[in-house]
Amino acid sequence: MAEVTTSGVKGSIVIDHATKRWRDRMAVENISLKLPAGSFTAFIGPSGCGKSTILNMVAGLEQPSDGYVFVSGRQVAGPTTDTALLFQTYNLFPWMTALGNVAFALENRGLPKEDARKSAMTLLERVGLGRFANCTPSELSGGMKQRVALVRAFSTEPSVLLLDEPFGALDIQTRRMMHSYLLATWRDTHATVLMVTHDLSEALALADRVVLMSGTPGRITEIVTIPDAFPRDISSNEFQVLRDRLDNHLSSSASLSEFNA
């Protein structure tokens, strides 16, 4: 194993020359990235450039073909309770209520059943779902289900939260509410957040850095630092310049991906 300088700080992430090959193609190639604990990073790039593959390697769901991934100073060898992953699909237990879904995660952390249910109710009330606590997922709207899923993910107090286009299917109003909840909880918990998104406004509104990727295979082409003042006015001239920069990258990367396909 090559000598790699990693931070042992809880929630820090180091990806060291990671490559992921499938049988007939290379998903990502030579990815190197150091993310400090408590940072919020958005990944942007054309479809198929390996953004989700990077999240899966950090989560321990996939192993790099070459290179290494470290979380909190330890090489990732598989999923851990210290990392939570949230997809665009809700992955709620359909036979459990909203309260039951969140309480289940808390019980898995070792909380007694009654304490878990009380804490779960408090968390649901924070996102306006207290009166829907006894509803099953089939009785909830898409936005409600995603709120339950996000609350459940944060309830385990992970050091790292991985978000794979979690708000893509939500309407604008619900998405903005989820953004507010995510930012507030991120600042409270100091979790390290990695998010895959195709929404440039979302990346600019939430992240403190944006990783630009090209493909195929997926490579990091640039890392853009975002001004960290909150709340952000993404309609300002400063953010419009950043948006145009990201948009130009997406357009050129998509054209190259089609040419290389």
Image: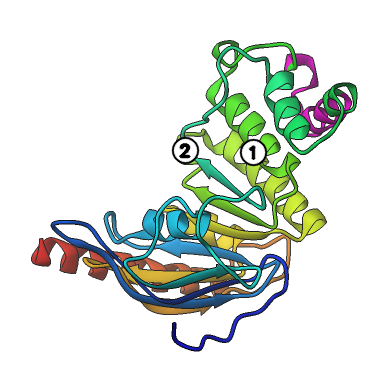
- Residue 177 drawn above or below residue 198: above
What residue is drawn where x is 64% and y is 47%?
179
Q: Judging from the image, what secondary structure is the residue with disc 2 in? A: loop
Is residue 120 rendered magenta in the image? yes
* Position of the N terminus by quadrant: bottom left
Q: For the image shown, how many numbered marks are present on the structure?
A: 2
- Going from the N terminus, do you reach mark 2 or mark 1 first? 2
Q: Position of residue 67 (x, y in %)?
A: 39, 75
Q: Label 2: how many residues lie within 10 Å, few (<14), some (14-19) or many (20+)?
A: some
Mark number, residue 150: 1
Q: Of residues 249 and 196, which is closer to you in this image?
A: 196
Mark 2 lies on residue: 88
Question: In this rendering, is residue 118 above or below 97?
Answer: below
Q: Give the Cα distance between marks 2 and 1.
A: 11 Å
What amino acid is at disc 1? Leu
Q: Position of residue 19 (x, y in %)?
A: 32, 70
Image coords of residue 257 (percent x, y)? 18, 64
Q: Magenta segment, which residues?
A: 118-132
As for residue 84 lying within the magenta part, the answer is no
At label 2, the amino acid type is: Gln
Which residue is pictured at 24% across the width and 70% down the height? Answer: 252
CB under 8 Å between discs 2 and 1: no
